[in-house]
Image (cartoon, rainbow, N blue to C red):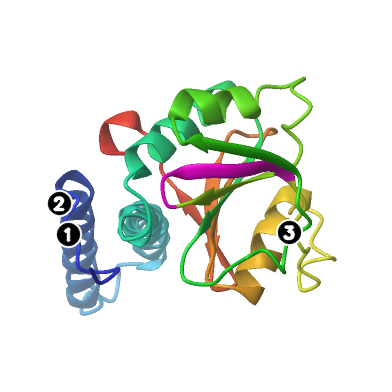
Amino acid sequence: MNETDCDFSPLKHQLIEGLQNVSAEINNGIESLENENYCLLGNLEDIKERFEQIETVAASFYLNCYLSPFTDKYLDLSTCIQHLSNQRHGALIVIERNNQLDSLIRPGTPIGATLTHSLLESIFYPGNPLHDGAVLVRTNQILSAANVLPLSNRVVSEKKLGTRHRAALGLSEKSDALVLVVSEETGRVSFAVDGKLYPIITTSSLL
C-alpha cells in the first residue's frame, strides 16, 4: 500500500472543503483588486490563517496514511495521543517503518507487548519511571520504553522546541521513522518525519 493511497473520509472531506474555500477566497481577492478603494490586506491575513488550519488537517490526514502500512494499531495510537493531549501528559512515540532503528537509539526497558492505547497511556503517566523516554513501536508491538533518541543539532538555538521535539526531529533526520510528540506544556501534538515537524489536530471524532 502506498503511503498516499489511503482514504480517511472525514479528514479527506475536510481537507478538500478547506482547499476549495481558500481557492474561492483567493479568486475573490483577485477580483477585488479592480476596486481601487478596496484594501486586500485583511483578506490576505484571513487566507493565511485558513492555510495554517488546512496544513494541520492535512498533517492529520497524512499521519494516518503514513501509519497504516506499518501498523494495524493506528487507531489505538490516535486514541492514545488524543487522551494524552487532553491531559497534557508529555509523550514521545517512535513508529519504526522500513529502517531498523536499533543502531540509532539508546535502548531503554524491554516491553514486548501488543500495542493498546491504555498501555501506552499508562507508560506516559506522570510519575511512571518509563515516561521520560521514547516508546518504540514495531508493527503492532511496543518493543521498549524509556529509549533515548539522537537530538537534532539543527534546532539547538530554537528555545521554543523542547527536548522531546528535538529528539523526534533528530531521529527523523537519520531514518524514515515516524515520531509522535505530545507537549506536556500545551498538550499540542506533532509528528516528525523526514526531518520536518508537523502539527496535527486531536479532535477524537476525526482521528
Helix, strand or loop for the magenta stretch, by majority: strand
Q: Is the residue 184 above or below the residue 146 in the image?
A: above
141 inside magenta stretch: yes
Q: Callout 2: few (<14), some (14-19), or many (20+) C-alpha neighbours within 10 Å? A: few
For the question of whether residue 136 can be seen, the reply is yes
User: What's the distance in space between the residues labelled 1 and 3, CA to CA?
Assistant: 32 Å
Residue 75: x percent and y percent?
A: 33, 38
Residue 93 image point, x, y percent: 58, 46
Of the two numbered discs 3 and 2 on the same chain, state the one appearing first in sequence: 2
Residue position marked by numbered label 2 in the rendering = 13
Q: Nearer the viewer, mark 3 or mark 2?
A: 3
Q: Is residue 135 above or below residue 29?
A: above
Q: Is disc 2 placed on a helix, strand or loop?
A: helix
Q: Are marks 1 and 3 in contact (CB under 8 Å)?
A: no
Residue at the location (69% across, 54% down)? 165
> Residue 130 — which label?
none
Q: Residues within 10 Å of mark 1 (few under 14, many from 20)?
A: few
Q: Kindly identify which residue carries mark 3.
A: 166
Q: Tell me the number on the disc at residue 16.
A: 1
Residue at x 68%, y 33% (from the top left corner): 184
- Tags 1 and 2 touching, CB below 8 Å: yes
Question: Is disc 3 surrounded by few (<14), some (14 to 19) or many (20+) residues within 10 Å?
Answer: many
Please state which amino acid type lies under the numbered disc 1: Ile
* Residue 200 on image: x %, y %: 44, 48
Look at the image and give the residue range highlighted in magenta.
Answer: 139-146
Q: Element under label 3?
A: helix
Q: For residue 68: magenta?
A: no
The three-letter code of the residue at mark 3 reads Arg
- The answer to whether 192 appears left or right of 107 in the picture is left
Q: Is residue 97 left or right of residue 8?
A: right
